[in-house]
Image (spheres, grey):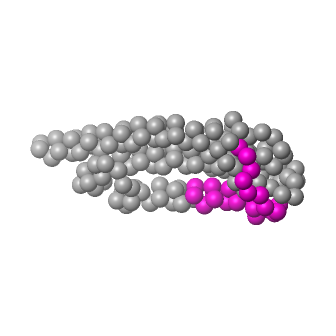
Amino acid sequence: MTPLRLIPWLLLLALVAFSALTYDTLPEQIPQHLDFSGDVTRAAAKSPLRWAMLPLIAAVTLALVQAISHVLPRNPALFNFPGKHKLLALPAAYQAPVVAKLQDFLAITSIVTVLVMCGAQWLLWRAALGHSTSGASMLVLVFPVVLLAALLLHLSAIVSATDAAHDAWKTSARR
């Protein structure tokens, strides 16, 4: 497993550890939802399942994305992106570098997903303790938008890699 693909699992482990360590510090009512200004709009009775909900969602999402990443080399049709038809037309040897980029894209997406869940859990914990979350709640919203730009750049690199592999294949076929 490459370091890039290991990072989301380490982040998930940190999220689970944080959630377990902070559970005893929570009051009897814990926030379930915050509005854009960081105010609690919905709370519920404290329970281990309620407090573990974000880590559970992160774990299931991460497991699904990793499963897709694992089967992607054998079935690249699972991933949709511009130029997919060119990738599927390539022999397996020419697909491999592009598939590796697709797997990196999924790993980056997993990192972003788990980081957002970490931020949301941290905000809910701060809100439960009565601390202000107004500035930090915007960070959880802005962070994914900024990283979306990075993901789109990576997606354009995937398209370029597909085009390059397709050109290399066509060149080698002419010889």
Image quadrant where residue 92 sits: bottom left
Image label count: 0
- Residue 77 vertical position relative to residue 111 in the rendered view, above or below: below
Q: For residue 51: magenta?
A: yes
Q: Nearer the viewer, residue 26 or 61?
A: 26
Q: Position of residue 63 (x, y in %)?
A: 57, 59
Q: Nearer the viewer, residue 116 or 111?
A: 116
Residue farthest toward the left in the current orientation of the protein: 174
Residue at x-position 36% and y-position 38%: 157
- Residue 65 vertical position relative to residue 118 in the rendered view, above or below: below
Task: Decide whether the magenta segment is chiefly helix, strand or loop.
Answer: helix
Q: Quadrant of the C terminus?
A: top left
Q: Nearer the viewer, residue 102 or 41?
A: 41
Q: Nearer the viewer, residue 53 or 94?
A: 53
Q: Position of residue 52 (x, y in %)?
A: 74, 59
Q: Position of residue 43 (x, y in %)?
A: 77, 58
* Viewer can see residue 142: yes
* Viewer can see residue 6: no
What segment is highlighted magenta in the picture?
38-62
Residue at x-position 72% and y-position 53%: 41
Q: For residue 80: magenta?
A: no
Q: Position of residue 152 (x, y in %)?
A: 42, 40
- Residue 20 vertical position relative to residue 37 in the rendered view, above or below: below
Residue at x-position 68% and y-position 42%: 37
Residue at x-position 21% and y-position 41%: 167
Q: Relative to residue 66, is residue 126 drawn left or right?
A: right
Q: Relative to residue 126, is residue 13 drawn left or right?
A: left
Image quadrant where residue 54 sits: bottom right
